[in-house]
Amino acid sequence: MLVFAKIKSVKQKISSLKKGTSVGFVPTMGALHKGHLSLIKKAKKENDLVVVSIFVNPTQFDKKEDLVNYPKTIDNDLELLKSVSCDLVFMPSAEEIYSKNIKSEIFDFEGLEHQMEGKHRVGHFDGVGTIVKRLFEIVTPTKSYFGEKDFQQLQIIKKMVKKNNLPVEIIGCDIYRETDGLAMSSRNVRLTKEHRKAAPFIFKTLKEAKLKFGIENAVNVVQWVQNEFKKHPLLELEYFEIANEATLQTISTKELKQKYRGFIAVFAGNIRLIDNISL
Ligand code: PAF
């Protein structure tokens, strides 16, 4: 496994290995877990060469303390990457990516960016778009893999690729869960014991909401979820929305032949967890 920190050297290496080769790319912010490894394993199956980036991107954090406290487990990450036969790791510094200008490009994602996470984390998706576009320029992947836990991010990246005609195929991958249902996230390690024990309530509620959505209207289901969290002593609901999968617009009535998803953000103490479910 080769590890690079400089753009110039990683680009040179990829172009020397690339000729006629498909490149699978998994961008990450490190603190790797089984969810990341499942993306990398899929990329391994579908490509000749697999590149993983580890970069905690400062421009996508709306809160400084979240950036500062983001878990960093680099030695363990590299061990895990070796265990799944990753070929090449790119782990640049912020200066290498942004020089002295740590700023986002401003994007128009045709409204996708104004819903849910975009409402609650202002500027977040400009930061994500900026780094993913930059990494695509450097890595020149054939396919790039993103988890559906960040479903809005996945849709936004697909939109960016389409609008800019970027020569990469975006592959969405199923949410990887702990055995008790909690969606895997790098932030889970920061939960207190009590909050970790309480957190599976999020997916349990999503599953019940899915059942209710089959027989009730969207407004009632949203209210039901809000009430469930009001009763919960440890978890605080930030939002639960039922939205159209393609437009991410919140709905109040169901239409035939449309796909819907329930999206949720919850505070467990000061750790913010997100999840979603296909309805
Ligand atoms: O999903 C993530 O971990 C990040 O948003 C990504 C795609 C690596 C960009 O920094």
Image (tube, rainbow, N blue to C red):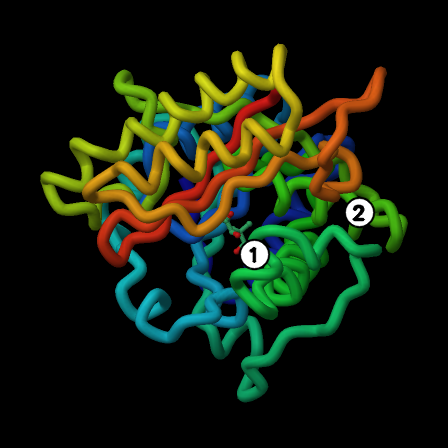
Q: Residue at x 55, y 37 (%)?
A: 263
Residue 152, position in %: x, y?
A: 63, 44
Front-most of residues 242 and 96 = 242
In this rendering, the answer to whether 146 lies above or below 269 is above
Residue 30, position in %: x, y?
A: 37, 49
Q: Are marks 1 and 2 in contact (CB under 8 Å)?
A: no
Quadrant for residue 260, please give it: top right
Quadrant for residue 150, please give it: top right
Ligand 1 near label 2 (Cβ, under 8 Å)? no
In this rendering, the answer to whether 270 lies above or below 223 is below
- Residue 129 seen by the camera: yes
Of the two numbered discs 1 and 2 on the same chain, state the one appearing first in sequence: 1
Residue 192, position in %: x, y?
A: 13, 46
Front-most of residues 118 and 142 = 118
Q: Residue at x 75, y 37 (%)?
A: 19
In this rendering, the answer to whether 72 lies above or below 60 is above
Front-most of residues 217 and 100 = 217
- Residue 43 seen by the camera: no
* In the image: residue 127, left or right of residue 76: right
Q: Secondary structure at mark 2?
A: helix
Q: Residue at x 29, y 27 (%)?
A: 200
Q: Residues within 10 Å of mark 1 (few under 14, many from 20)?
A: many
Amino acid bearing label 2 = Lys
Residue 154, position in %: x, y?
A: 65, 41
Residue 159, numbered label:
2
Q: Nearer the viewer, mark 1 or mark 2?
A: 2
Amino acid bearing label 1 = Val
Q: Which residue is mark 1?
A: 10
